[in-house]
Image (tube, helix red, strand yellow):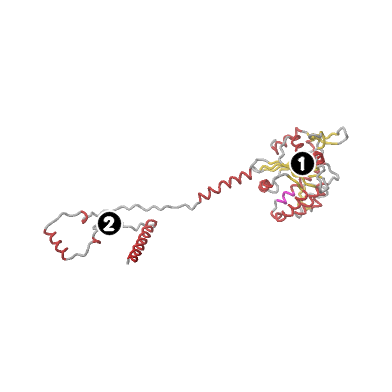
Amino acid sequence: MILRFLLWRFVTHMVYQFKMTDAMFSQEDTRPTSVPADPWSETRPIPTLEDDFDARWDETHPTPIYAAHHIPEERIEWAEPTRKHRGRGCGCLLGMAVPPLLLLLVYLFFPGRTNILLLGTDAREPETWVGRTDTMVLTTILPWQPYAGMLSMPRDLWVVIPDYGENRINAAHFFGEADHPGGGPPLAIQTVQSTFGVDVDYYLRVRFLGFLEIVDALNGVDIELSQLMSGYEAGTHHLNGEQALAFVRDRAGSDDFARITRGQIFLKAISRRLLTPSAWVRLPQVVTALGDFIETDIPVWLWPRLGFALLRLGPNGVDGRVITREMTNPFTTSGGAQVLGPNWQLINPVLMEVFGQ
C-alpha cells in the first residue's frame, strides 16, 4: 500500500509539473483571469444536522463576518509568461570560423608581391644544367589587385656580371653553373638585381626540350598571331610540342627581339591552356614533365597562392612587356661582339610600372 501511494504521488506530481511547464511555454494564457467570490466553497464539507443548527443560530445571533467568507471579487492581472529563446550556436560557430578565414585571406593576398626569374636554358645533357639562358623573363605577381606582369630581356643585353665583369646577360647562368652545380640561378638573380634594381624572390629554370614534353602533356596549345610570324599566318594555330619548340627557337630571318616576342606569345598560350578547366585532367602528366625538365626554388606552399591570383586574372590578364629595340643602344665591343647597351631613360619607367621599383 505504501508503495502504491508513493507511486501515485510521483505520477500526480509529474503530471502537475508537465501541465505547469506546458502553460508557461504555450502561446495562449489559459489561466483564470479572476478568482471565485468564495474560494472556500469548493472545499467545504457537506452540511450536516449540526451545521443546519449552527446556521439557524447564526441567523438569530449575528456574529462577526470573517473576511475569508467575503473576499471581494477583483481581477488579478497575470503576467505574460516570457519565452526564453535559446540560440542554436550560430554565434559560436561564426566565432570559430573567423580565425581560419582570416588566415586564409592573409595566405592568399600577402605578401603583396612575388618576383620570379624565368630562365630557359639550352642545356642538352640531362645530368647538367650548364648552358646559356636564351630566354630570361622577370615576372611579378601581385595577388591583392590582382596583377601579373612579365618583362622579357634580350639575351645580347650588355651588363656587368658580379665577379665576372662585363658580358651578355645570358652568360650569367652559364658562368655560375660551370663554376659549381646549382650556381647558375643565384648568379643570374644577382645580375638581374644589380642591373635593374628589382628584387628577385625565386627562380624557375627549364630546358628547352622540356617545352616539347609539357606541350604534349597538355595535348597542344593555341597561339594567337596578329601578323605573319615564323611561317604562320595571322590568326589562331594549334601547335604540338615539336611545333611549339620550333616556333620559339626559330632564327630564320629574325633577330633577338623577334624571338622575345615569340617567347611571350608561347608563355601566354601555356598560361591560357593551364587555366582552361578541360586541361586540368592532364595536370598529372604535366607535373611529370615538369619534374624532368624544370627546377625551381619556389616553395610548394606558395603555388596555390600564385595559382589563385592567375585564376582571378583570367587567361588574358597577364601584362606582357618587352625591352624593345628602341630601349637599347647597339654597339660592337672591343672583342668584335655585337651587343645591346641599355637605354635607362626608356627602361626605368617600364620597371616602375611593372615592378614598382
From the viewer's side, name the closer residue of 113 and 275: 113
Callout 2 crowding tier (Cα within 10 Å): few <14, some 14–19, many ≥20: few
- Label disc, if present, on residue 35 of the rendered structure: 2
Q: Give how far across and how far down residue 275 sits, in percent.
A: 70, 51
Q: Give how far across and how far down residue 236 sits, in percent.
A: 76, 51
SS type, badge 1: helix
Residue placed under numbered mark 1 in the picture: 185
Q: Give how far across and how far down residue 284 sits, in percent.
A: 72, 54
Question: Closer to the camera: disc 2 or disc 1?
Answer: 1
Specify the quadrant that holds the C terminus: top right
Among the 4 quarters of the image, the one containing residue 130: top right
Left or right relative to 36: residue 239:
right
Residue in view at x 70 percent, y 47 percent:
316
From the viewer's side, name the closer residue of 263 and 235: 263
**How far apart are the two marked residues, 2 and 1, measured between alpha carbons?**
97 Å
Callout 1 crowding tier (Cα within 10 Å): few <14, some 14–19, many ≥20: many
Magenta stretch secondary structure, dominant: helix
Residue type, numbered disc 2: Val
Residue type, numbered disc 1: Pro
SS type, badge 2: loop
Indicate whether residue 32 is drawn in magenta.
Answer: no
Residue in view at x 81 percent, y 52 percent:
243
Q: Which span is picked out in magenta?
A: 269-274
Q: Give how far across and how far down residue 309 sits, in percent.
A: 66, 46
